[in-house]
Amino acid sequence: MKFGMNLLLWTGELNDGLTPVLTSLKSMGYDGVELPLFNLDLDYAAWGRKLDDLGLARTAVTVRGEADNPISPDPAARAKGVEATKRTLDCCHAAGCTTLVGPYHSALGFFTGKGPTADEWKWGVESMRQVAEHAGQAGVMLGIEALNRFECYLLNSHADSARFAREVNHPNCRVMYDTFHANIEEKNVAGAIRDCADVLVHVHISENDRSTPGQGNIRWAENFDALREVNYDGWLMIEAFGLALPELAAATKIWRRMFQSEEQLARDGLKFMKEQVAKRWK
């Protein structure tokens, strides 16, 4: 098992001020970090070398918006979405990120007032197949993320995201599982993990209030028991949000500080994950 920390707790863009944070995460015992890939004009090859020097492996996360929505009825918008994610994959390759996760299957926070149409589903699969071809060339695995109904409408359950990935039908297109979204959308979290087990490549460990894992109301025993049952052995990546990034706080609806400090959250979260794994994986 690999233990990681999503850097969105501190920033939406890599910058030199993160060096003490990265050094601290390594000293705590983290194996790697998840990089926010929103600004695609940074020198990601240099960041890859820096993270290599620190001994931190990495994955990455990105999103799509209304202007580059891969399920838009406008073919030009769909094409922009495909190209934007392809360019993101090039950045992943440069930085040495093994997996790109996130809701880049459709526009984050954009709604039509109804569920996905057959055309939107078809456009999404067609767009993602093009992205997956590029991911194969870049040597990066896709981990498609289902979000709760308040953040998107295309993929809300892990059964949906698994079906979507199977229809894309490419070896570089798989899914990720997120404990926060599952807590809202899934009637049975163990069943949700089983539903996507054959295409599961990544796991976000996220508390119900987006703060320190293990200190809220997520049904953690059920989640970890099911992950052990399906023999999951990949990244357990903490995804937590705070107030450091105003635009992210607005998007994730985080108005209150839910933890003492980012360092406390990272330290306690890592301890919690390692304890849960030690109980189950021998």
Image: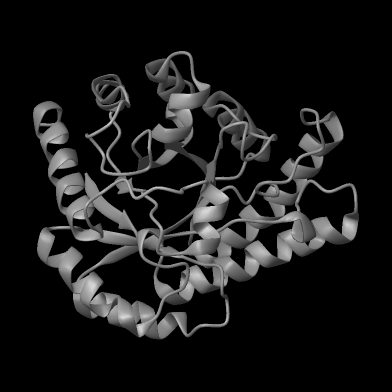
**In the displayed structure image, the side of residue 206 where residue 259 appears, left or right:** left
Name the foreground residue: 164 vs 150: 150
Image quadrant occupied by the C terminus? top left
Q: Does residue 172 appear in the picture of this structure?
A: no
Q: Quadrant of residue 280?
A: top left
* Image x and y of residue 204, in percent: 38, 42
The quadrant holding residue 56 is: bottom left
Q: Is residue 37 above or below residue 207?
A: below
Relative side of 259 to 199, left or right: left
- Residue 257, image x, y percentages: 34, 50
Residue 229: x, y in percent?
27, 21
Residue drawn at (28%, 75%) of the image:
51
Task: Pick the residue in front: 56 or 258.
Answer: 258
Horizontal and vertical percent for residue 174?
A: 52, 42
Q: How is the image coloured?
A: one colour
The structure residue drawn at horizontal position 53% and vertical position 42%, both measured from the top left corner, is 145
Identify the residue at image location x=39%, y=52%.
241
81 and 125: which is toward the camera: 81
| View extreme (right): residue | 74
Q: Along the horizontal axis of the image, is 277 left or right of 236?
A: left
Q: Residue at x 31, y 45 (%)?
A: 258
Towards the viewer: 164 or 237? 237
